[in-house]
Amino acid sequence: MAEAQNSPTLGSARAGGPPPAGSTTAGSIAVAAESTVATRMSAPPSFDVADFPVPHGREEEWRFTPLARLRGLHDGTAVASGEGVKVEIEAPEGVTVETVGREDERLGKAGKPVDRVAAQAYSSFEKASVVTVAKEAVLTEPIRITVHGEGGVAFGHQVIELGAFAEAVVVLDHSGDAVLAANVDYVLGDGAKLTVVSVQDWDEKAVHVAQHNALVGRDASFKSVIVTFGGDVVRIHPRVAYAAPGGEAELFGLYFTDAGQHQEHRLLVDHNTPHCKSNVAYKGALQGQDAHAVWIGDVLIQAAAEGTDTYELNRNLVLTDGARVDSVPNLEIETGEIAGAGHASATGRFDDEQLFYLMSRGIPQAEARRLVVRGFFAELVQQIGLPDVEERLIAKIEAELEASV
């Protein structure tokens, strides 16, 4: 597996249009790596959809996305219809669950929409769910939010807010068939600890575009685990900012892209405050004709963010011919007074040597393939920390591998 590792670069740079300089193509694998942020948005963040031009695919933030397959989410032709999605929330004692209107002041506190689809979602939802964990509450059971598509188009907004020194785990589970645009806000009080596991296990025709905003308080810890399997097009945009010094963010991701699927994960960690940390690690496997995975990892270290410590990693395993990966890690550093910063990207085909080693010891080929892929994903699956979810994901990975044998 070829790996590109880049040292941090002082200053800033912008790029757009065609694939970046330094991109390489090996068969059906496309790998791109840059050392500076290249994904500036074409318009400033805004809650108003009118502030964003209709994308045409030439914009930096849309150049990898198949706009024609978004079913009108990007140009305003998609309107809420059919049954949409059904949202159910199971919460333990110490948690308040509310359904609120658009005027609730807690909506949008973690961040504004940064593209037209996110703004369309914010402008179009009717009711939002607000889940609040009380100050100093330490939950022993996870909060489970189930989003099930029942056909049609839907727009959504969810807020999860933790009071100071509260601790919680949230499982956000997507399934069924829908065209969904949504925003999810995570607001962490000082000293709070939040782990979020977002699972995209959609039916094959579903379209899901979402922006996840996390605002991390003083000495608070935020961990996000995003798992993507199903859907025709899935585009998730996690974003992290810090409200005060001492915050930590860990962003993990796992995706398995099948024939014809487009799965895109675009991340931004905005180090806008001194002495904060972040760690990003995403891994993906691809198989089948026209399977397309996109990973964009942006880390911005602003001039005021002295003492920042950050690292980001993306690795991809291509199991068959006909699949494509675009992997773009970016760093923009505006101060030299940092603890550390770096990134790496690696994409490669299935390791025949590993396969041969296992088969030479009597392990059948199909089982050997499963062992290699399970080992590839094991580190990230273990970050979930919920046995029932981990077992389900391992079973899903093995089912995907069965289909490719």
Image: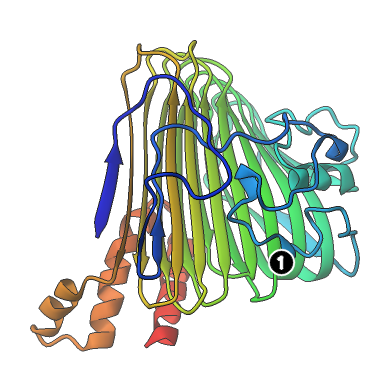
Question: Relative to 158, is 8 above or below?
Answer: above
Tell whether 149 sits left or right of 16: right
Tell whether 388 sits left or right of 175: left
Asked whether residue 2 appears in the rendered view, the answer is yes
Image quadrant in which you'd find residue 379:
bottom left
> Quadrant where the C terminus lies?
bottom left
Tell whether 107 sits left or right of 42: right
Please name the residue shown 54% across and 51% down the image. 265
Kindly identify which residue carries mark 1.
69
Q: In this orientation, which residue lies closer to the viewer: 402 or 51?
A: 51
| Residue type at tag 1 | Arg
Q: In this orientation, which residue lies closer to the viewer: 280 or 100?
A: 280
List x then y, in percent, for residue 370.
30, 77
Q: In this orientation, which residue lies closer to the viewer: 205 or 347?
A: 347
Q: Secondary structure at mark 1?
A: helix
Colour pattern of the rendering: rainbow
- Tell me the crowding category of disc 1: few under 14, some 14 to 19, or many 20 or more residues within 10 angstroms, Cα based: some
